Image (spheres, rainbow, N blue to C red):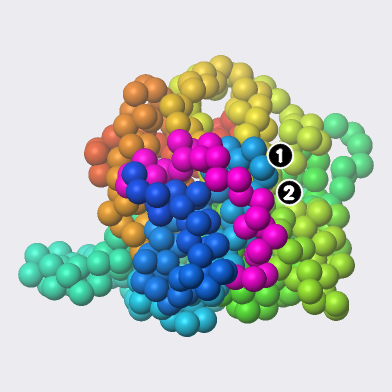
Amino acid sequence: MSAERDLLAQCIQCGLCLPACPTYALTPRERANPRGRIGLMRAVDRGEMAVDDPAFAQAMYYCLGCRACETACPAGVEFGRLLQGARGAVEKVEAEGRPEGFPRDWLLDHVLPYPSRLRWGARLFRVYQRTVGRSRRWRAWFDDRFPEAAALAPLLPPVPALRHSTLPAALEPGEVATDLPARRTRGSVALHPGCIQSVLLPETNLDTMLVLAYNGWQVVVPRNIPCCGALHAHQGRPGDARSLARANVAAWEASGADRLVSNAAGCGAHMKELRHLLADDPEWADRAAAFSEAVVDVSDFLVREGVRRPRRPFSLKATYHDPCHLVHGQRVAEAPRLLLRAIPGLELIPLVESTWCCGSAGIYNLTHPEAAQELLHRKVGHIRATGAEIVVTGNPGCILQIASGLGAEGSPVRVIHPASLLRVAYELSPGLRR
């Protein structure tokens, strides 16, 4: 913990972060909020508490890592970096109380870095659901032994959505629309496809490419670009995260694009901070800093550079959920709303607690399914109160999590990425997800 001593010293223990902390709302205990967790980190740093104490591990992993406390903090404490350091210390000693076994370690070690494996793993689980999982006896046996894996069930899309979807290597503005202004391409941007996004929500990546091209940008997909490593970093695996970070930097450099656009809030927030992850690597530090500067969320990019306004009215009631790592990690809140307001006829209805975590939080809904469900139920209740027909949000985990919660209630409300909604508004093509 000594490496984070300066960051720990920033916390003034004022408690202004407490009302913003979702886990503190669920469990009003001191160690379930940022101030209490920092207190435990300080105790470990002073040698007053062992890093392998189960209470320490449980407190660190019960945290969502949503970083809402950073937005609320008047002292500018970078809690996300502190949390990653604390979890890294726990992982080194394999302390009791940390999430382990299936599916966390399996996902991080053998699946997420390999999209083809992720695709096949999702297919196999779907097969289980449609066969053995239909038997109450076998389903009860499986759920009892693998409760975290059972939490995957409502999150996986139907089988057709799991089919392999290959993105074009590049997309030119002229390939999307013939009514573009007679001017040169505005520039070249690379799209980071993401691991979860590319397998479970491939249509979002294609929609993003089409919207960027429609707005005059040449879009390329870097060759052999891997998982960004966000989940590995968040789970206290800095070595794995650094290896993936280097591969991402190299892939972006080889693409020749000026910017790297992300349409997944969690991926974007992590990639913007690779400068910290590789700061001590003399070969990669400057390259990682340039990479971090190049990363931008698609909504933020479109608003900054100018977005074409859809021509046809689009009569629809929508509400917007702020992905945690977009609003708290990247500090992007207004850009997605400005995109939605640019769609003629769209009524944007405010969402109560729009900046509160939906419970997805990377793989939190797998490692802590009960707490995740409580947060999801709270979120769905607020969505239902808006009377909106669709929920717009810019992160694959949020899309899957909220869609599963609405589906469980039989709600007709659908969930969509801002880029997909823009594509619908531009071309009236299908893109909504139940």
Q: Which residues are magenta?
A: 1-27
Are there few (<14), some (14-19), or many (20+) residues within 10 Å of tag 1? many
Residue occupying the far right of the picture? 184
Asked whether the viewer can see residue 417, the reply is no
Distance from disc 1 to disc 2, alpha carbons, whole Å, reads 7 Å
The image shows a total of numbered marks equal to 2
Asked if residue 415 lies left or right of residue 72, the reply is: left
Determine which residue is flagged by label 2. 296
Vertical order, 422 against 202 (above or below) = above
| Quarter of the image with the C terminus in it | top left
Q: Nearer the viewer, residue 210 or 133?
A: 133
Quarter of the rendering containing residue 254? bottom right
- Identity of the residue drawn at 52% across and 22% down: 348
Vertical order, 158 against 118 (above or below) = above
> Residue 287 shows which numbered tag?
none
Secondary element type, mark 1: helix
| Quarter of the image with the N terminus in it | bottom right
